[in-house]
Amino acid sequence: MRILICSNAYPPNFIGGAELVAHEQAKIFLALGHKVRVFTGEILPNQNDRYKMRHFKHEGIDIFSIGLHAKDFSPEYINFFHDPVDLFFNHILDDFSPDIVHFHNIMGLSLKLPIIAKEKNIKTICTLHDFWGFCLRNTAIYIDNNICVNRNKCLTCLKHEYGDNKKYRHNKFRNDFIKFSFLHIDHFISPSSFLKKEYIKNGLPENKISHLQNGVNPLFISNTLKGSKKTIISFVGYLGYHKGAIILLKALQNIKTNKPIIVFIIGEGPQKEELEKYCQINNINAQINFLGRVPSHQMPYFYRKTHILVLPSLWAENQPVSIMEAMASSCAVIASNIGGIPELLKENRGVTFTPGSYQELTSKLEKLLHDPSHRAEISKNAHEAVQKITYERQSQTLLCIYDDLLSKRRKISYHVNRLFFPKQKRVNEFNIPFTWLKYVDLKFKK
């Protein structure tokens, strides 16, 4: 089978949860004898390198990247439509002739990519990692950092967006374009039941989306006993407001214990300087170590040293890779009771607390510190729950889905008389205004 994986970022240039999932799948597909290529974006600081294309290999995977700028990923900018990206993607399709295109996050690239693939009668699938399909900020958090509970108030966050020609475009165009692009994806994958329900609530047909958990790399699956006389607590993730690292620091500031604590803060992000300053000016009862970005091949070592992983997210996470890796490594996990996290930590596999409540986090950290038997129990339960959920199992299931899609391959035809309703001026089940279609270079076939 010829498989093209498409993601707006990809290792080694960027390493996040979604990117790691895409890369692990690519490696397994390749090892199983399939032809695999990756199409991705790469942030380049030089203005002249924008839309520069290059080909390289990473861990045996052929990667084709196109140069982008940070603004191309910004919601304030037109981050969903780039003609040069479309042209390059079209060239890759013609050269590689994939049977399947598997999309991950594509904001920053172009929402026309699924449309281009379907015009060539290529089967398409998309794994959803966050809320990018209906939230311009991906996290469903308002600009004032409050959680969004009304999906119909996108204009509260952003009324217009910039384009290269400096003209504003109404944000409604973005939302309609996403819905239209989604019509060209044959099937969707959601790693959590929570995220699946959110997309269904926002208009995705239930029969087009399946729940399939992300796997975990076998390198993290270990029963190695934690050493050290000191308790090691780790935070692993992007250092941005929505990840809630400041909540952990506030909890450590108020914790009451005589046990020595070492804290690893692993990750980079815009909040790093603020967090470091907070540690300097406040009396925190722990030794804090900001380790920055740690290469993925070194992460198993840190998890095996970690006794407790804390993920104090303020946004509704999908299926955090850090939690999966920590559970596989027999760490005790404390995380926010939000999004898909409770699914992972149910049945005494971890501890949850109210998002944003450092007081509750403090209390539950103290209990784990002073009750080693409880910590050992949830660590054991967590390890047993995820040790069989490997990337290989997940990839084998994906291949079955691919086979099913390919067995149903047929030429796509669009019937204007079915899509267009003169009285409502609408098309399809997503109720996209017909007038918006003039912005999309599609030829409808009768």
Image (cartoon, rainbow, N blue to C red):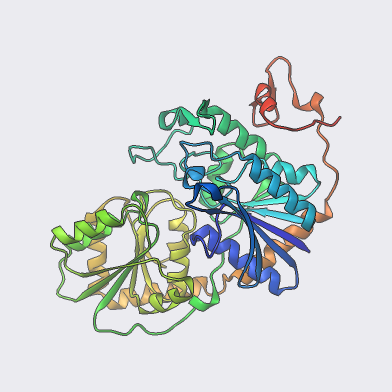
Q: Nearer the viewer, residue 225 or 67?
A: 67
Q: Quadrant of residue 55?
A: bottom right
Residue in the picture at 50% in, 71% down? 385
Give the left or right position of residue 26, taking residue 218 as reference: right
| 117 up-or-down from 393: above or below | above
| 103 up-or-down from 112: above or below | below
Question: Where is residue 171 drawn, in percent x and y?
Answer: 51, 29
Give the left or right position of residue 329, taking residue 87 as reference: left
Question: Where is residue 28 drawn, in percent x and y?
Answer: 66, 71
Question: Where is residue 35 drawn, in percent x and y?
Answer: 75, 66
| 428 up-or-down from 425: above or below | below
Q: Nearer the viewer, residue 251 or 2?
A: 2
Give the left or right position of residue 229, taking residue 14 as reference: left
Disc tally is 0
Determine the residue located farthest toward the front in the rendered image.
48
Determine the residue located farthest toward the top in the rendered image.
423
Q: Quadrant of residue 243?
A: bottom left
Q: Quadrant of the C terminus?
A: top right
Q: Quadrant of residue 112?
A: top right
Question: Where is residue 379 drawn, in percent x and y?
Answer: 39, 74
Q: Nearer the viewer, residue 141 or 198?
A: 141
Residue 361: in sight, yes or no?
A: yes
Q: Quadrant of the N terminus?
A: bottom right
Residue in the picture at 79% in, 52% down? 94
